[in-house]
Image (spheres, rainbow, N blue to C red):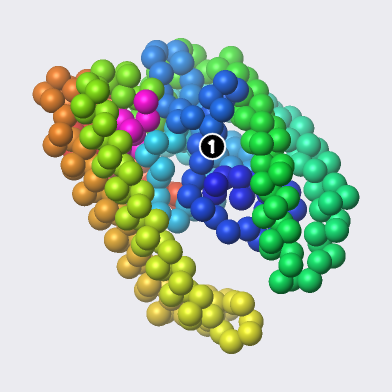
Amino acid sequence: MRLISLIIGAAFAVPLAAAGQDQLGSPGNQGQSTGPGGQGQFQSSGAGQGAAFQRAPMPSFGGVNPIQSHTMELLQREEVKRELHITLKQRQAMDEATNSSQQQLATQFSQLRNNPDMQKIRSLPPEQRQQAMQEFMQANVQQMVAQYQSWQGEITEKVKQILKPEQIKRLNELDLQYRGSMAMADPRVAERVKLSSESRNQVARIHGDYQAKTQQMRQEFYQQMRDANAPNTGQAPRGQLGQVRPPVQTNTMQIQQKLDAAKKDAEEKVVAFLSPEEKQNWIAAQGERFTFRKDYPNGGQRRQGLLGG
């Protein structure tokens, strides 16, 4: 689970392999997909390492996860704040709420980091450390997930008290536009759009195929990066001033283009399968069209077309 890997990596400063992206919602979801609900219903996101409103998120290679709600991430974007008419008082209140909750979460992970078993893992030779860490993660992942879900639920409830119902409604609409039409693979979104059982199964199949295809693309890319590593350094070749050399940079652009093309193809397939009524429901669920900044990290590309997807 990519999110849990990020959490553990932040807590223990030990590199972990990322394997997909899990979605963590508010308490009660237990790792199930979360998506925009009805008017006035705020959805949490798996923002990873704490969603600080005052700090832009780290870029996510491959773009936006369509079955994960990104409302907390979107609240960090200035153009979204302007669209929602977030006041200075609301911004300050969200920052205070986030900082307080982050400190609590950091304390919890600090305690886990100082676990005696972790001290032993750090002292192991490199060839044994990774296996020991994986075993430790398997033994403690549920605890860490529960802690993160508790934190996410707490911050979500605080933000619900800060935003107005109309702001929450618009935020959920923007979240759907940001995620694209494969968001309907999220059961809660499918329910909101009133997809038939047949459409739900088809959308789930398309999304599953998309995940498998893009996962293979990423694995091939990472293998190419490993092959390009300088001998015995474990570091990718770098040019002057720490810049990635042109061949690696070019490869990164190429894989991103392939991932974007795969997502567009999958979204087109989803929309093409919908009935006329389902298409109208999907359009209505997104509200008025909005253009996200292209130059923003983590999938801030312009999202237009595909019936709003």
- Which residue is located at x 40 percent, y 45 percent? 64
Is 181 contained in the magenta span? yes
Residue ranking furthest to the left: 276
Is 128 on the left-hand or right-hand side of 206?
A: right
Q: Position of residue 216 (x, y in %)?
A: 37, 60
Front one among 269 and 248: 269
Vertical placement of residue 295 versus 55, above or below: below
Start-end of magenta stretch? 178-187
Q: Position of residue 244 (x, y in %)?
A: 50, 75
- Which residue is located at x 54 percent, y 37 percent? 46
Q: Is residue 301 visible?
A: no
- Which residue is located at x 85 percent, y 65 percent? 123
Is 230 on the left-hand or right-hand side of 35?
A: right
Front one among 28 and 162: 28
Q: Is residue 165 visible?
A: yes
Where disc 1 sits, the SS reads loop
Is 277 on the left-hand or right-hand side of 201?
A: left
User: What amino acid is at disc 1?
Assistant: Gly
Is 166 contained in the magenta span? no
- Which residue is located at x 29 percent, y 61 percent? 258
Residue ranking furthest to the right: 116
Choose top left, top right, bottom left or bottom right for residue 4. top right
Magenta part, dominant SS:
helix
Mark 1 crowd level (few <14, some 14–19, many ≥20, 10 Å Cα): many
Choose top left, top right, bottom left or bottom right for residue 259. bottom left
Q: Position of residue 51 (x, y in %)?
A: 59, 38
Q: Position of residue 122 (x, y in %)?
A: 81, 62
Q: How many labels sit on residues? A: 1
Instruction: Give the quarter of the figure containing the C terminus.
Output: top left
Q: Which residue is mark 1?
A: 46
